[in-house]
Image (spheres, rainbow, N blue to C red):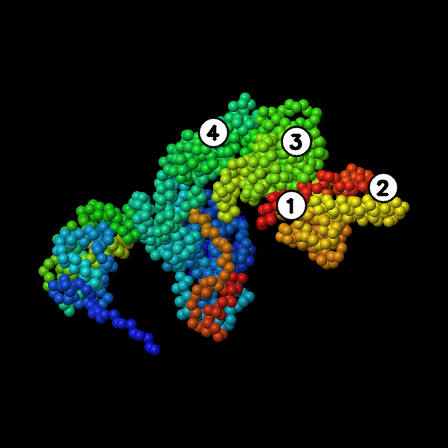
């Protein structure tokens, strides 16, 4: 007797995403494959104080619902691409129209002279670089910029011109808001991006600090400086020849085959007796 | 002598040159040649060839331009090279042309240093050792040399610590090694070749030379060589190069905590201590590979070869760590942070609160050993003075428990009491981290506070009894005012009391003289033992005398009694029967196993005939009110069984002392005997045992509690505090604590003690008296009656001579058999247990021997007895018992001897006297037991010597078992009494007792008659007796 089929679950229509449709002012947004989705799934976005400082500018503009909708956009992965460049963040955001919108958040970059001063400060006080390299914006970093009359974070929307190719007249629109939330997350992960946005990327900054710290000085001590200890060892010699590992084939074992056949075997195996002999 | 120098010429390799002092006088050269002038006192090629020959090589001749230290001169003026061995201070470098020999790198690997070699050689030879080491470990890869005769060359793989070693060589490379000006890289700028590159080049040449040398007898296969020469391997080797690239793997930030001993100027740090937290990076793959921040900042260039951005990695790690350890921030506010200084408080905070979170977050934390093993905080008490005019120190055997002493308390770290200064330092330290006795000590602040608080309120005065309780009782059992919140690490006192506490009492007590009433001379260790017993008695503190068997515990107790009671010649007012003891009118109650009751009686009669001994044991013992009996006794000997039965009456009286012989028999504290023992009221309590009870915790508790009730707490508490931690968890500290606690009350000397051994003869012979069971006694009587009847009949019939002699011998043999065991006479193969007093004693002795892990020989003259005894003992003790008799084959005999002599071999060897009496060496035995007497002592001696041959380094204990009140004892008396005349009285030849058979029937009857006291309790309760004493063993 064939087994009885279990009664089917009541049919349920699968909707792609619940919710957003009810908020949509210009129709349903078009889903994006491989969009940049916010890692934060609920609540606030931007965990650190420094990304919070950046978002505060946005929030001060207080365009209520648009920020929330932007957050939803960010989480839904509507942002197709995003780049934090010196002076601007540029992003492409998929809205309800077929053509994605182009969103941009600008910032004033600091002059080279200002960066020189910052790099000087960083070179004299390793705490700033250590903290940034450790993934945290030191809470006194603003003072460094303050000393040269600059503010690391924008103090208001005027310093942070935003525009979006969408038809929404309000600034920020939800697309800009979505971009801003994603930028905040990027700042959380890599605080150097704030500095890059302000005009100096990580590699340049670190190289500048290194140069100032002068730890790339000549690796070779000039002979002329050591004429007084010319004939003798300049330091302790390392201990050589501790307990032998006992296996002279260890390194050979790590090596891939040489791909050449010698006497019917891979050349690596042809070398093996030699390695064994070296350890004998 | 030439000053030999080596330069490593990029491309050319090792170049030998030399300074010749003899040429120095020649003055400067005046060549106006373009470029470098010839060195004025460089050795020429001929001289160099001689040097090369001495190094076992030859080399190609050439010239090199070296930049060498030279004298300063005005611009354009003549300069001179400064000799390498001179003391002149050079001012500048100048180029000089010197003759050189280009040598194979081999010479650095395989030549002995020559006199005159400069520092360059030492470093290059050390580099050669690194190369040889790399080769031996196979840390090399093939490097094809297509134009070489042997195209298969080798190069080093520098990873991990090898890379660091190579970098260290680069840093240490003497400038002279890289002094050559090479085409395209003039040294004119004063910089010279990169030492790291030179070291790599030299190492490559050295590795190649060493590897080729090692492979000289094992050439590669021709096909492999052909493939190498044709470049077939090159694509594959290129992939290998990636795997073998210099690399040290990822690194993690590591913090090393150290003390600052000297400051930057090398002066010892004084005042407030300082600590240094050193920053470093440690390879994640090889923890031994650690680079300090200091060297990262100094030499980031060379580190960059194996670590991406070492300085940034360091900073990133420090930045990450600052999230856990915010104090780090301040230390980073410099251009090149290398570490941070910590004061005492900061150090404590780091060790206590930061190190573990850093470790959990993946950072390396290297802490000093004194932190990983934190110091143990405790208190010590020292008792001094005393209310008496003499003070404790002067008191000898008269110290009383009630005596008042002063206490001084101290904090102790790891058991060492702190001086006042040290204590003050600890109290005033901001953090409980103090430098004590040359090391740092971390203590728990809370415990420190509790300890200091206790010191404020701790009693300043107490009694000697308090001292003992404090020393030995568990602190929970102490009254609140004595209970320290910290472990009491040590309790010390001056004088005798101190000696007692430290367990060295027997060595430090003032020795008593042998009591005049004692008819024996004590051996020195016995005299120490008696003095110790008397000291404890004076304190009225119970003791356990646990000397090895054979060392004379019985004698020591008898001597103690004689000392306290005096002999018949001493007046009634012996000093020691003073106020602290019961008057001499009260007797000592001695409880022993049934089998040795008779032995006590006889030993007392022999050694202390002045003591009035009453045996309260057996069917004929006094019943009812014992007041009168006890009043007339100094020593009342009873058995555990009798004590159990008569406990109601015996416990009505008060005793001078209670002595528990073979005290391990009361180890089961729930047994009736143990309960009975506890009801006895005595001024002093002693226990005797020959087994090492200190290793058997339950037994130790029972015995200690019997002699010092309550000292070790309840049995349940004891199990929790000591038995479980020691036996189940192997806690040595707890074991030590227990040892300390019982130390004052326990005296155990073993035969192997140097101090005892010196006092001991090579062998100790004792005769042990056993009693007969009722069954034995009645059988014995039957044999005696039969014999008397038979002899009377023969006498009447006038048939004496041979026939009479045969009858006498047969009867004597039967009597000996009865003394051994009834089954031996009955020939019925009946079970052995509990039918023979002698066997009971054998079992006790064997139990002690086995407990001590020693071995014994047992001799009997009756094969039948041996046949039954061997399996019986094997079952009883669960050990292998060897049994050698006349029917044993020679091979089996040899096997047995070998087994017995081997370590861990069977511990018991039973031998028939005839089969085993001669020709064997059985020195593994420390005990010889003669189960039955031989009429001829010479035969016994010969058997005894089995265990006593050359090779025996220990004292051998010889026991001859004799049933008291029987023919055995009487013959023993005869033999012992006439030993000096033995040769005359007793035939030398064998066991042919002419002197016995020749006795008249009446005389014979007297010799064999059974004494009324020969049996133990007898029929109705004898078996019960054994039950009580052995209940534990039977259960096991």
In terms of secondary structure, where does tag 3 sit?
helix
Read off the residue under disc 4.
B408
- Residue count near mark 2 (Cα–Cα under 10 Å), binned few <14, some 14–19, many ≥20: few
Which chain is mark 2 on?
B
- Cβ–Cβ under 8 Å for marks 2 and 3: no
Read off the residue under disc 1.
B1023
Say left or right for A276 vs B523.
left
Task: Please name whichever residue, B789 or B134, is drawn nearer the observer in this view of the structure.
Answer: B789
Quick one: which residue is furthest to the right in this view? B798
Labels 4 and 2 in the same subunit: yes
For residue A102, above or below residue B96: below
Name the spot of residue B653 as percent of width and height, x first.
59, 31
Q: Of marks 1 and 2, which one's residue comes earlier in the chain?
A: 2
Which chain is mark 1 on?
B
Specify the quadrant of the image occupied by residue B590.
top right
In terms of secondary structure, where does tag 1 sit?
helix
Name the spot of residue B835 as percent of width and height, x first.
68, 48
């Amino acid at each position: 007797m064939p087994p009885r089929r279990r009664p089917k679950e009541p049919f349920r229509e699968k909707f792609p995403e619940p919710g957003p449709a009810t908020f949509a002012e210009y129709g349903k947004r078009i889903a994006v494959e491989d969009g940049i989705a916010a890692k934060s799934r609920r609540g606030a976005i931007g965990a650190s104080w420094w990304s919070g400082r950046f978002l505060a500018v946005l929030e001060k503009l207080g365009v209520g619902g648009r920020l929330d909708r932007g957050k939803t956009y960010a989480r839904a992965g509507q942002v197709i691409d995003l780049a934090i460049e010196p002076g601007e963040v540029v992003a492409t955001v998929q809205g309800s129209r077929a053509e994605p919108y182009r969103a941009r958040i600008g910032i004033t970059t600091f002059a080279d002279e200002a960066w020189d001063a910052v790099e000087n400060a960083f070179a004299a006080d390793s705490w700033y670089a250590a903290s940034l390299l450790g993934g945290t914006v030191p809470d006194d970093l603003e003072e460094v910029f303050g000393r040269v009359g600059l503010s690391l974070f924008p103090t208001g929307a005027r310093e942070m011109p935003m525009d979006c190719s969408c038809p929404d007249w309000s600034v920020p629109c939800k697309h800009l808001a979505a971009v801003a939330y994603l930028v905040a997350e990027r700042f959380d992960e890599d605080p150097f991006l704030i500095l890059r946005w302000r005009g100096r990327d990580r590699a340049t900054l670190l190289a500048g600090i290194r140069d100032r710290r002068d730890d790339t000085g000549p690796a070779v001590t000039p002979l002329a400086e050591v004429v007084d200890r010319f004939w003798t060892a300049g330091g302790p010699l390392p201990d050589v020849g501790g307990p032998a590992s006992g296996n002279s084939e260890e390194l050979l074992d790590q090596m891939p085959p040489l791909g050449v056949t010698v006497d019917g075997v891979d050349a690596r195996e042809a070398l093996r007796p030699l390695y064994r002999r070296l350890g004998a | 002598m030439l000053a030999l120098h080596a330069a490593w010429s990029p491309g050319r390799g090792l170049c030998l040159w030399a300074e010749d002092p003899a040429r120095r006088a020649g003055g400067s050269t005046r060549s106006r040649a373009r470029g470098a002038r010839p060195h004025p006192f460089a050795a020429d090629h001929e001289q160099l060839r001689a040097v090369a020959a001495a190094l076992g090589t030859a080399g190609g001749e050439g010239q090199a331009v070296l930049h060498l230290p030279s004298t300063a001169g005005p611009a354009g003026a003549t300069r001179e090279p400064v000799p390498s061995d001179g003391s002149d201070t050079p001012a500048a470098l100048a180029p000089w042309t010197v003759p050189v020999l280009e040598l194979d790198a081999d010479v650095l690997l395989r030549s002995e240093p020559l006199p005159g070699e400069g520092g360059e050689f030492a470093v290059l030879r050390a580099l050669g050792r690194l190369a040889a080491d790399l080769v031996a470990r196979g840390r090399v890869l093939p490097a094809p040399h297509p134009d070489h005769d042997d195209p298969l060359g080798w190069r080093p793989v520098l990873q991990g610590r090898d890379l660091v070693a190579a970098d260290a060589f680069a840093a240490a490379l003497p400038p002279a090694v890289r002094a050559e000006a090479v085409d395209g890289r003039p040294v004119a700028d004063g910089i010279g070749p990169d030492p790291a590159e030179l070291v790599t080049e030299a190492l490559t040449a050295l590795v190649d030379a060493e590897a080729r040398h090692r492979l000289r007898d094992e050439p590669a296969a021709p096909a492999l060589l052909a493939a190498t020469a044709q470049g077939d391997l090159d694509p594959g080797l290129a992939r290998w190069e990636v795997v073998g690239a210099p690399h040290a793997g990822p690194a993690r930030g590591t913090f090393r905590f150290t003390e600052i001993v000297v400051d930057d100027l090398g002066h010892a740090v004084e005042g407030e201590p300082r600590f240094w937290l050193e920053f470093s990076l440690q390879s994640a793959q090889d923890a031994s590979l650690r680079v300090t921040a200091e060297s990262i900042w100094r030499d980031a260039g060379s580190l960059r070869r194996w670590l991406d951005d070492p300085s940034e990695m360091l900073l990133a790690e420090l930045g990450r760590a600052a999230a856990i350890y915010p104090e780090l921030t301040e230390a980073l506010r410099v251009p090149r942070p290398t570490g941070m200084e910590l004061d005492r408080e900061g150090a404590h905070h780091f060790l206590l609160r930061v190190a573990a979170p850093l470790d959990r977050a993946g950072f390396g934390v290297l802490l000093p050993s004194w932190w990983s093993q934190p110091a143990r905080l405790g208190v010590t008490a020292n008792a001094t003075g005393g209310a008496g005019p003499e003070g404790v120190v002067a008191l000898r055997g008269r110290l009383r428990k009630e005596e008042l002493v002063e206490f001084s308390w101290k904090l102790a770290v790891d058991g060492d009491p702190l001086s006042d200064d040290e204590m003050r330092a600890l109290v005033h330290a901001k953090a409980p981290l103090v430098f004590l006795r040359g090391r740092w000590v971390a203590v728990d602040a809370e415990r420190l506070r509790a300890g200091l608080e206790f010191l404020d309120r701790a009693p300043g005065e107490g009694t000697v009894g308090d001292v003992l309780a404090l020393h030995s009782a568990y602190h929970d059992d102490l009254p609140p005012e004595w209970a320290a919140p910290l472990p009491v690490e040590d309790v010390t006192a001056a004088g005798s009391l101190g000696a007692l506490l430290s367990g060295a009492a027997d060595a430090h007590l003032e020795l008593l003289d042998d009591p005049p009433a004692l008819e024996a001379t004590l051996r020195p260790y016995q005299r120490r033992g008696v003095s110790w017993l008397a000291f404890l008695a004076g304190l009225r503190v119970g003791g356990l005398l646990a000397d090895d068997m054979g060392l004379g515990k019985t004698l020591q107790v008898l001597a103690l009694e004689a000392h306290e009671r005096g002999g018949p010649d001493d007046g009634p007012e012996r000093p020691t029967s003073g106020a602290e003891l019961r008057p001499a009118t009260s007797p000592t109650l001695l409880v022993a196993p049934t089998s040795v009751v008779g032995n006590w009686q006889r030993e007392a009669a022999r050694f202390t005939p002045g003591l009035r001994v009453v045996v309260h044991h057996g069917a004929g013992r006094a019943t009812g009110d014992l007041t009168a009996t006890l009043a007339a006794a100094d020593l009342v000997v009873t058995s555990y069984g009798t004590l159990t039965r008569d406990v109601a009456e015996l416990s009505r009286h008060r005793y001078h002392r209670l002595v528990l012989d073979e005290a391990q028999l009361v180890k089961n504290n729930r047994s009736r005997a143990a309960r009975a023992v506890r009801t006895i009221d005595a001024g002093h309590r002693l226990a005797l045992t020959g087994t090492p009870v200190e290793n058997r915790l339950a037994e130790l508790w029972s015995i200690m509690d019997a002699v010092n009730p309550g000292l070790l707490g309840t049995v349940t508490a004891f199990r929790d505090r000591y038995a479980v931690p020691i036996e189940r968890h192997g806690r040595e500290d707890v074991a030590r604590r227990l040892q300390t606690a019982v130390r004052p009350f326990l005296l155990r000397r073993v035969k192997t003690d140097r101090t005892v051994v010196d006092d001991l003869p090579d062998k100790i012979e004792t005769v042990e008296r056993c009693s007969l069971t009722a069954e034995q006694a009645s059988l014995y009587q039957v044999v005696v009656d039969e014999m008397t009847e038979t002899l009377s009949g023969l006498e009447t019939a006038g048939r004496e001579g041979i026939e009479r002699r045969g009858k006498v011998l047969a009867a004597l043999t039967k009597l000996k058999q009865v003394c051994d065991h009834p089954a031996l006479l009955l020939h019925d193969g009946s079970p052995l247990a509990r039918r023979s007093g002698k066997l009971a004693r054998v079992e006790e002795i064997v139990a002690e021997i086995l407990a001590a892990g020693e071995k014994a020989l047992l001799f009997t003259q009756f094969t039948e007895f041996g046949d039954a005894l061997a399996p019986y003992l094997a079952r009883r003790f669960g050990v292998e018992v060897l049994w050698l008799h006349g029917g044993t084959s020679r091979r089996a005999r040899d096997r047995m001897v070998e087994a017995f002599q081997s370590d861990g071999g069977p511990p018991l060897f039973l031998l028939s006297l005839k089969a085993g009496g001669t020709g064997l060496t059985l020195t593994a035995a420390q005990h010889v037991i003669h189960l039955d007497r031989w009429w001829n002592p010479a035969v016994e001696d010969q058997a005894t010597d089995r265990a006593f041959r050359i090779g025996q380094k220990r004292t051998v204990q010889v026991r001859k078992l004799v049933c008291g009140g029987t023919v055995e004892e009487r013959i023993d008396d005869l033999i012992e009494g006439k030993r000096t005349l033995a040769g005359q009285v007793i035939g030398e030849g064998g066991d042919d007792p002419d002197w016995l058979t020749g006795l008249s029937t009446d005389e014979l009857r007297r010799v064999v008659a059974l004494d009324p006291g020969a049996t133990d309790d007898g029929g109705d309760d004898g078996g019960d007796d054994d039950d009580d004493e052995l209940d534990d063993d039977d259960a096991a």
